[in-house]
Image: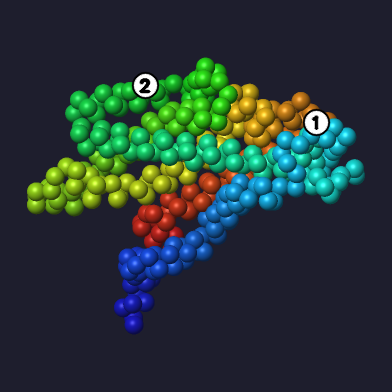
Amino acid sequence: MADAAQTKGTGLLVDQEADQGLGAKLVYVGRLLWRDKSGLLGLIMFLTVVFSAVLAPWISPHPPLKQDLRAAKRPPVWAAKGDISHPLGTDNLGRDLLSRIIYGSRVSLTVGFFGVLIAGSLGLVIGLVSGYAGGRTDNVIMGGVNLILALPYLVFVVFIAAILGRSLINVILIFGFTDIPIFVRITRGEVLRLRESGFVESAKSIGAGRLRIIFDHILPNLLGPLITIATFEMSAMIFYEAGLGFLGLSVPPSVPSWGNMLATGRKYLTIYPWIATFPGLAIVFTGLGMNLFGDWLRDALDPRMRRLKR
């Protein structure tokens, strides 16, 4: 009993419990999450946005494109002339802000998720090839990566968006392909470190081939860092998409998005500030939630950080 208590104090028993099956792993992750209240708060905030996007047709009080000029520029419900039918007020065309914010979360999450999926998948493959092959292949790949990273990112994205035009698919592809170098560098660095580790050398000594080493020994150890950076990059893509929308280079004006709402509200910022304030708060809320959860995820996937936190 004393040995078990001592082992648990070092964190070793907890790590062993995580290897006992799916149920034990879920309990283990839940225990880690409950211990870190900021990570739990971040997950709740992020899931709130996700569920809002999924349930938008059922929880939105009004259709997002419905115009009512008689109710235009109506303030939030707690203001003097507010109306309970429009809790966050209306914009210059009488469209309900709460409904547009809820539907706008769909655009932001779609861009963030699929953009990270494209960048992470391609970056993982290219980084594996670069790190494990080495030599001239590594030099050519990293030369191209460093060249892209040397470009001012926002200017580069704006330039491409201006050429391709306003479309949700174009925005996803822009962020997906321009974010590949970040995942390539992270993957390559981890592969270079893992390639010289003891378990890889042991696998080589018993005759394991390259593909087996990559898929059985290196790739599983890459998932933790890549998942962590994916959460931060998804948050960054949501911010950048809103920036493109603010500049008029994201989705068409007929599509509710937080960036488009900010662009509309900019004209009335000093007179009707709620038109731009609430979409801006939605962006901050989503980004903060994802960053808090990503910070916890980074510590949870690193056993050394878990033990330091104890």
Asked which secondary structure carries label 1, the reply is loop
In the picture, the disc for residue 162 is none
When the figure is inspected, residue 211 is found, relative to residue 122, above or below; the finding is: below
Q: Which residue is mark 2?
A: 147
When the figure is inspected, residue 17 is found, relative to residue 281, above or below; the finding is: below
Tell me what residue is drawn at x 50 percent, y 24 percent.
157
Q: Nearer the viewer, mark 2 or mark 1?
A: 1
Left of 286 or right of it: where is 190?
left
The residue furthest left is 206
Q: What is the quadrant of residue 266 in the picture?
A: top right
Classify 10 Å Cα crowding around label 1: few (below 14), some (14-19), many (20 and above): some
Q: What is the quadrant of residue 107 in the picture?
A: top right
Classify 10 Å Cα crowding around label 2: few (below 14), some (14-19), many (20 and above): few
Asked which secondary structure carries label 2, the reply is helix
When the figure is inspected, residue 92 is found, relative to residue 30, above or below; the finding is: above
Task: Please name whichever residue, 129 or 60, is drawn nearer the observer in this view of the structure.
Answer: 60
Tell me what residue is drawn at x 86 percent, y 37 percent.
71
- Ranked by sequence position, the earlier of labels 2 and 1 is 1
Q: Position of residue 46 (x, y in %)?
A: 57, 50
The CA span between labels 2 and 1 is: 44 Å
Q: Which residue is mark 1?
A: 92
Left of 200 or right of it: where is 123?
right
Task: Please name whichever residue, 190 or 127, is drawn nearer the observer in this view of the structure.
Answer: 127
Q: What is the quadrant of residue 278 in the picture?
A: top right
Quadrant including the C terminus: bottom left
Quadrant including the N terminus: bottom left
Left of 129 or right of it: where is 258?
right
Q: Position of residue 85 (x, y in %)?
A: 82, 47
The kind of residue on which mark 1 rests is Asn
